[in-house]
Image (cartoon, helix red, strand yellow):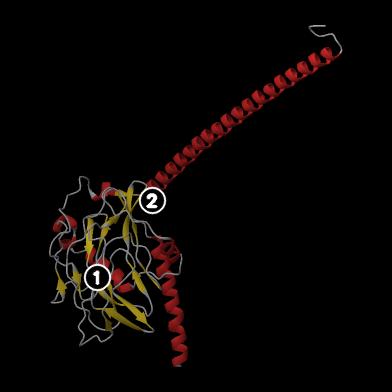
Amino acid sequence: MNTHRFIRWLIFANLMFSLSAALFAQVFISVRFGPPALPVYAQPICPGPGYFWVPGYWAWNDAYGYYWVPGTWVVAPVGMYWTPGYWGWREGFYVWHPGYWGRRVGFYGGINYGYGYGGVGFRGGEWRGDRFFYNRSVTNVNVVNVTNVYNRTVVVNNTTNVSYNGGSGGITMRPTPQEEAYAREAHTAPLAMQTQHEQAASQNRALFASENHGRPAIAATGQPGEFSGHNLVGAKSAGAPYHAPKISPQEARVSPGEVRGAEARRGENREASRNVRQQAQQAKVEQRREQQQAKQEQKRQLQEQRQRQQEQRHQREQERREGRGPGY
């Protein structure tokens, strides 16, 4: 009986993961202006073994614009690492690339989310078998409650609070071939508790950028959805001066069709540019061919001239021998 129940649970879990991944893949958000800078905040203490840090980020609400999703600790799938989502510049707009769980950490825009996420990879801890070990140099853990720890110095080159990749003032980092390979590996969508955490944040006006001006009162929580209580952390400061957008959220939202249209136009421009380059290359080839033909013609004429001169010399020599030349 227990075996049958376990099998049914596995089937259900696989179905839910498949549905979650399908919905996850369909998410598309594109905006005309970029998010505020990442706020400066401290990491809440890790609740216990097995918890994994998911850094805070700016999400989008069509009615109110950008809002802060507090960083939080979640119980991680065994052996899996979280790759944070990020905003990236694409075809003149800022497009959201959702985060995901995977065996390795992929590209997340080069954004310095902190606490192990310095822009490349993750240095906050590592799996050793089915146990997660925390790097105390960048992770806030209590060694009384969490004994799976180690210390390893982490050097972060990107010390800015910029929250998006590309565009004006954005991070210029591009994915490495290794990160591109990681992106093609099997991924798992955000956990249900992460999705619920984000949805709850979208309903909290204090987390709207238009209200907190880049300095949310709740920057991080001890556990998902925990927006009240003692285990909350507020932002110490905004990551940069806040500039209110000049257009409404409704005007800022970009439809998938607009992005596809921009991509199509870019494709047409690329095709036109490619045609111009090909024509220029063809013109160069034709010019080189004409120059080569001109050189060959000049060489041929020179050879003919030399041959005529040689024939004339031969004829004069022949006439001299026969006594018909000058002086006879």
Q: Residue at x 35, y 73 (%)?
A: 81
- Residue 179, located in which quarter of the rendered image? bottom left
Residue 288, position as x, y percentages in the image: 58, 31
Q: Is residue 165 left or right of residue 144?
A: right
Q: Which of pointers 1 and 2 indicates the residue nearer the eye?
A: 1
Q: Is residue 326 above or below residue 77?
A: above
- Residue 247, located in which quarter of the rendered image? top left
| SS class, disc 1 | loop
Look at mark 2 in the image and give the residue it sits on: 256
Residue type at numbered disc 2: Pro
Q: Residue at x 22, y 62 (%)?
A: 68
Residue 308, position as x, y percentages in the image: 74, 18
Q: Residue at x 66, y 24 (%)?
A: 297
Dot 1 or dot 2, earlier in sequence: 1
Q: Is residue 317 left or right of residue 33?
A: right
Q: Is residue 125 above or below residue 280?
A: below
Q: Is residue 4 above or below residue 19?
A: below
Look at mark 1 in the image and give the residue it sits on: 115
